[in-house]
Image (tube, rainbow, N blue to C red):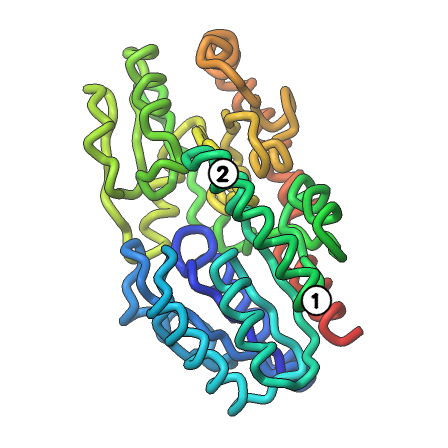
Amino acid sequence: MKVVHVIEALGGGVYTYFKDLSFYFGDDKVVKEISTTIIYSGNRKEIDPEKIESQFSKGVSLIKINMVRDFSPIQDFKSILHLRKELQKLNPDVIHLHSSKAGVLGRIACFLLFKRKKIFYTPHGYSFLRTDISNLTKKTYWLIEKSFQQLFGGVTIACGDTEYEIAKKIGKSMLIRNGINIEEVRLQHLKTQNQILTIGIVARITTARNPELFNAIALRFPDFNFVWIGDGELNSTLTAPNIRITGWFMDRNEALKELNTIDIYIQTSLWEGLPIAVLEAMAMKKPVLATNVIGNKDIIFHNETGFLFNEIEELDCFLELLKDDKTRNQFGDNALKRCNDLFDKNKNFTALAALYQH
């Protein structure tokens, strides 16, 4: 069986997801049943496009084509033609589209093949859930998602529980949660002791991760240290004197080592799909503070693995509790167990392989 994955947004957590996917489906035993090709765009700033082939499994094939994130009629048309050409050559049995942009371009390219294919689509966070766009734009994105599923068919594979509830209202769908390589993450876990309680996030400094809120929290708690592991176009918004910005780590293990040094993980997102970085923090036994939005609330078990919050004032109580070492350790143990139960990439990719072969 031939399976082709198409992804435009190869960066951040999605990059980690695909790297793990490549090693699962590139394993010799799996390759005997399923051959995998990943068609991707390498335009994201947080990745080194020269290192993708060396960091992905040799058991999968990689094809790079130019796709852009924003709407661009001329470039999008070129991307569709290039994508159609590659799909014609590969002649896959299954086509799995990832992210909203690839979902649109990929479905049109599949239609232009004039051959019936088994199509799956994972939004990794629907575009119409963004809070930085107008209501009219949200409605437009929703109509695109709804109409494309009706016109071109396919099954939506939601990466999180709330995304699944939304997907069911749009069309045929099912749930296979995001997962991580827990063993690999745990290799970077070492016991650390900070003189000052340290709170951190792993993310691109962009609107979706709400750096303004992160900065406000740092100002509210001047006795704690804060670290933003990553970089981005909104780094100038992080002005609090107790914030340190690390910049990008092109070596993922170095980013994980930095993650290991924090005491509490915080996710200040305005919207999410199912954030990989939160799962990695939980695998490292970090209690998590997270905004009460889709994606975050599908991972965090409130008052067991961390806390969900709607207002910054709620953090006064939560951080008072998490200042205690024993409480943090208990929450961390609970977080690792929840990862093992629900977010193990081997279990989730096994379910994905079974779906392709069904």
Q: Is residue 248 above or below residue 242?
A: below
Q: Is residue 77 above or below residue 15?
A: below
Would residue 237 be seen by someone viewing this image from the given angle?
Answer: yes
Residue underneath mark 2: 136
Residue drawn at (44%, 35%), measured in percent from left and top? 134
Can you give x and y, in whole percent of width and height, for residue 216 in the image?
A: 32, 17
Q: Is residue 288 left or right of residue 244?
A: right
Would residue 278 be seen by someone viewing this image from the given angle?
Answer: no
Badge number at residue 153: 1
Q: Is residue 263 left or right of residue 154?
A: left
Number of residues whose C-alpha sits closer than 10 Å to that of mark 2, classed few (under 14), some (14–19) or many (20 or more)? few
| Among the two numbered marks 1 and 2 on one chain, the one whose residue lies closer to the N terminus | 2
Badge number at residue 332: none
Q: Nearer the viewer, residue 73 or 103?
A: 73
Q: Amino acid at mark 1?
A: Gly
Q: Which residue ends up furthest to the right in the rendered image?
A: 358
Measure the C-alpha gap from mark 1 to mark 2: 25 Å
Q: Nearer the viewer, residue 29 or 93?
A: 93
